[in-house]
């Protein structure tokens, strides 16, 4: 209910930046004309170092924060505040014995961690880390490259990266890794659809799939507001994509020991570890870019000094802050949620996320169509604000449908809950099913009929009384024995 | 005509693509064939991007990696770890018919491709057109205009055909359940009713020195219990023997009864 009213409010209060016509061209707005190859190389190395340092830091951060959530200190021995713990762990994994199981498919077994680790880095090439800056006299955007299909590229690279996990599971030649690999396959196939669909709403709003243009289109309003539902779906699916709790079914140490990486050790294991954390940064960076305005400063800070803090190298700071908000969210989830059961996870993806995201995309398409004037140009004025008739009508229809759906869903849930509330009958026949069943708390046992049929009245009396006496005294007996 | 970068990329990747596609045909393990297919698809995507078709290239990678992943699932679930192809002809004359069709297809391909004349100016003008479209309309919008404008009917008919094929596959593969599904609670009740294995089947033996899943549990009299091992392991002939373990047990019993041998 709150969902639909929020949509209504937001769509009515859309400022000019979003209601305005989409740009005629979907090409990137970032200008790379003044970027010689060596500047691009410097940026690439910079991003690589940024990611490696962030990974070192985030593993320490995660362990410390989870420690705090579980009321223990976390790593605090190596370096100040235990900051060098991750470095020490990395060194240790390099020196450990590298084991290849006898049944493993050797080539694939070695390639799998390489795929998982390298693919994680690729996507960051199209993430804009900041505005246009000057590097050694060259004006260049703080982004390695941008293409008209940048966001799709991230999805494509992610789907290649999953091959690392699947192949690791298959090539280990043992059961737990195979199960982990299969789980991860099914997980990725199901959740990538919902993820792609949730991003379609952003493409519709910004009119482009290039990251620089999506960031530029959010200069007046971050897409987390008009596309709030997409944001929710994306956040759920990004946890599923990165195999993190509560969706870490491919590892599931309680069920599958280590899942796909059970057989891996030393540096090859460290590569999976690195890949997982870099992937977390990649999906968080994409969420920042798509929904939180990318490198742009938060609205109040952007207003200071006519946008003095909203561009250039300052962008890197805002981007990093937003990125780490998502990382904290990941850690928080891990600290508070148990693992989801596998069939529930699958049902949630197919039966809920995909259909409802599809409906949301259709709704957004109509809202955008109305805003761009495809459904008529009529306007009317309420309280000094000019509103488009088509937009108001479409938003009202969407709101009514969402309201009705929420209402029906709520009713059904109440019905289900009522049906699930099991009231045990006051009396039970302990031998009804053919074997003895003890009574539930507060239940009386039915007098056994037909027990003494055929025998005399005199002999019936003691039999029933003895039965009832043992039955009534049974709870007391259980307590004394129990 | 082709830039240096494009030529270098082509001559680096094309041999890999050819090797991978040959691997798809000749690989012994089905999973290796699937990997070969994935490699071919990804390299094709890269080729499209080199030809300035960004959207097509990325979608090629995106869609086909997912499709090959499905193939993986089928390979692992349906083919199993060790199975050989059945060479029984279920439809009479099937082999000859398919042979004729293959010859026909090869002939058609040969004669149509053989008559195509690729001259440099046509290719160049086509490439120029793509570059021009990318610059003015944008690559994605350009493809959208083609799909939802000029070729909208072909596109819609193809999608209808694909949906029909998917539905048809589902209908053909669907098997009607003849009896109602037995729930876990019903199984438990049935076991109690029949008074057989009331507490479930015995679990396989847990021995400190042995991977236990394939080792049958020992009954009180020392004989191995067939019920305790998975029937998959039995049919694969992977059940371990328990004689060595029984020997140890007998030895210990002797020790207990007759005292340690001096």
Image (cartoon, coloured by chain):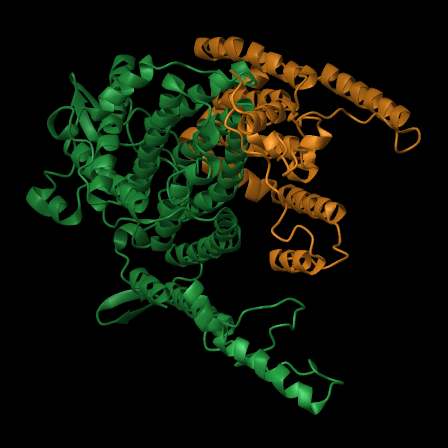
Chain colours: A green, B orange
Residue A217 x %, y %: 29, 44
Q: Is residue A186 left or right of residue B196?
A: left
> Tag count in the figure?
0
Outermost residue to the bottom: A457
Q: Along the horizontal axis of the image, is A25 left or right of A84?
A: right
Q: Position of residue B171 (x, y in %)?
A: 74, 49
Q: Is residue B126 left or right of residue A221?
A: right
Mark yes or no: residue B79 visible: no
Q: In front here: B204 or B2? A: B204
Does residue B135 lie above or below A339 as drawn?
above
Q: Residue at x 41, y 48 (%)?
A: A204
Q: Relative to residue A52, is residue A287 depicted above or below?
A: below
Say left or right for B181 vs B210: right
Residue placed most toward the observer, A68 or A163 = A68
Residue A15: give x, y in percent of width and height.
Answer: 25, 56
Q: Is residue A458 above or below residue A198?
A: below
Residue at image location 40% in from the left, 54% down from the top: A368
Q: Is residue B105 visible?
A: yes
Report the residue that reaches farthest toward the left: A305
* The one of A164 and B180 positioned closer to us in this rendering: B180
Q: Position of residue A279 (x, y in %)?
A: 36, 32
Quarter of the rendering containing residue B71: top right
Residue A53 placement: quadrant: top left
Among all residues in the image, which is located at the extreme right? B92
Q: Quadrant of residue A14?
A: bottom left
């Amino acid at each position: 209910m709150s969902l639909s009213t929020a949509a209504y409010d937001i769509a009515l209060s859309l400022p000019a930046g979003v209601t305005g016509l989409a740009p005629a061209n979907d090409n990137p707005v970032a200008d790379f004309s003044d970027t010689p190859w060596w500047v691009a190389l410097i940026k690439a190395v910079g991003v690589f170092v940024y990611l490696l340092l962030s990974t070192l830091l985030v593993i320490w951060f995660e362990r410390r924060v989870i420690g705090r959530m579980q009321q223990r200190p976390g790593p605090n021995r190596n370096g100040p505040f235990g900051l060098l713990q991750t470095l020490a762990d990395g060194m240790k994994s390099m020196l450990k014995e590298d084991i290849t199981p006898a049944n493993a498919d050797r080539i694939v077994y070695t390639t799998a961690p390489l795929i998982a680790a390298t693919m994680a880095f690729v996507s960051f090439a199209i993430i804009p880390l900041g505005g246009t800056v000057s590097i050694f006299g060259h004006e260049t955007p703080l982004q390695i490259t941008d293409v008209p299909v940048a966001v799709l590229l991230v999805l494509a690279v992610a789907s290649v990266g999953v091959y690392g996990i699947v192949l690791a599971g298959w090539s280990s030649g043992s059961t737990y890794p195979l199960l982990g690999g299969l789980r991860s396959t099914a997980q990725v196939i199901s959740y990538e659809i919902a993820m792609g669909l949730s991003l379609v709403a952003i493409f519709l709003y910004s009119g482009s799939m290039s990251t620089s243009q999506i960031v530029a289109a959010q200069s007046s309003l971050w897409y987390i507001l008009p596309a709030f539902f997409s944001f929710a779906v994306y956040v759920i699916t990004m946890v599923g994509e990165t195999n993190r709790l509560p969706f870490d079914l491919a590892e599931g140490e309680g069920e599958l020991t280590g899942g796909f990486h059970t057989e891996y050790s030393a540096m090859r294991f460290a590569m999976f570890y690195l890949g997982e954390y870099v992937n977390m940064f990649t999906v968080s960076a994409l969420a920042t870019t798509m929904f939180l305005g990318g490198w742009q400063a938060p609205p109040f800070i952007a207003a200071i000094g006519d946008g003095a803090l909203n561009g250039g190298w300052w962008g890197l700071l805002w981007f990093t802050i937003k990125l780490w908000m998502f990382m904290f969210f990941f850690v928080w989830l891990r600290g508070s949620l148990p693992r989801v059961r596998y069939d529930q996870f699958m049902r949630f993806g197919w039966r809920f996320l995909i259909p409802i995201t599809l409906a949301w995309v259709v709704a957004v398409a109509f809202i955008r169509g109305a805003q761009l004037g495809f459904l008529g140009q009529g306007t009317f004025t309420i309280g000094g604000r000019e509103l488009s008739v088509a937009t108001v009508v479409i938003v009202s229809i969407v709101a009514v449908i969402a309201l009705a759906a929420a209402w029906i869903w709520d009713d059904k849930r109440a019905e289900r809950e009522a049906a699930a509330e099991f009231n045990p009958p006051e009396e039970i026949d302990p031998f009804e099913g053919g074997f003895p069943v003890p009574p539930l708390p507060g239940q009386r046992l039915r007098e056994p009929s037909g027990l003494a049929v055929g025998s005399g009245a005199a002999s019936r009396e003691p039999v029933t009384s003895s039965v009832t006496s043992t039955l009534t005294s049974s709870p007391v007996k259980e307590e004394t024995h129990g | 005509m082709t830039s240096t970068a494009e030529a270098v990329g082509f001559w680096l990747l094309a041999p890999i693509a050819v090797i991978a596609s040959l691997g798809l045909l000749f690989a012994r393990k089905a999973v290796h064939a699937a990997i070969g297919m994935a490699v071919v698809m990804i390299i094709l995507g890269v080729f499209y991007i080199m030809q300035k078709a960004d959207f097509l290239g990325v979608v090629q990678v995106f869609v086909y990696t997912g499709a090959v992943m499905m193939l993986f699932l089928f390979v692992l679930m349906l083919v199993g770890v060790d199975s050989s192809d059945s060479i029984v002809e279920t439809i009479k004359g099937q082999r000859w018919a398919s042979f004729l069709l293959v010859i026909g297809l090869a002939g058609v391909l040969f004669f149509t491709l053989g008559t195509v004349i690729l001259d440099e100016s046509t290719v160049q003008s086509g490439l120029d057109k793509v570059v021009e479209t990318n610059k003015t309309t944008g690559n994605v919008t350009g493809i959208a205009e083609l799909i939802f404008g000029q070729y909208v009917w072909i596109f819609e008919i193809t999608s209808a055909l694909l949906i029909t094929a998917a539905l048809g596959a589902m209908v053909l593969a669907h098997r009607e359940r003849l009896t109602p599904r037995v729930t876990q609670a019903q199984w438990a009740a049935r076991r109690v009713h029949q008074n057989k294995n009331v507490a479930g089947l015995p679990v396989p033996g847990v021995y400190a020195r042995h991977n236990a899943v394939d080792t049958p549990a020992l009954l009180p009299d020392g004989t191995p219990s067939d019920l305790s091992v998975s029937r998959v392991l039995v049919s694969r002939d992977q059940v371990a023997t328990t004689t060595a373990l029984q020997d140890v047990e007998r030895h210990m019993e002797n020790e207990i009864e007759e005292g340690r041998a001096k």
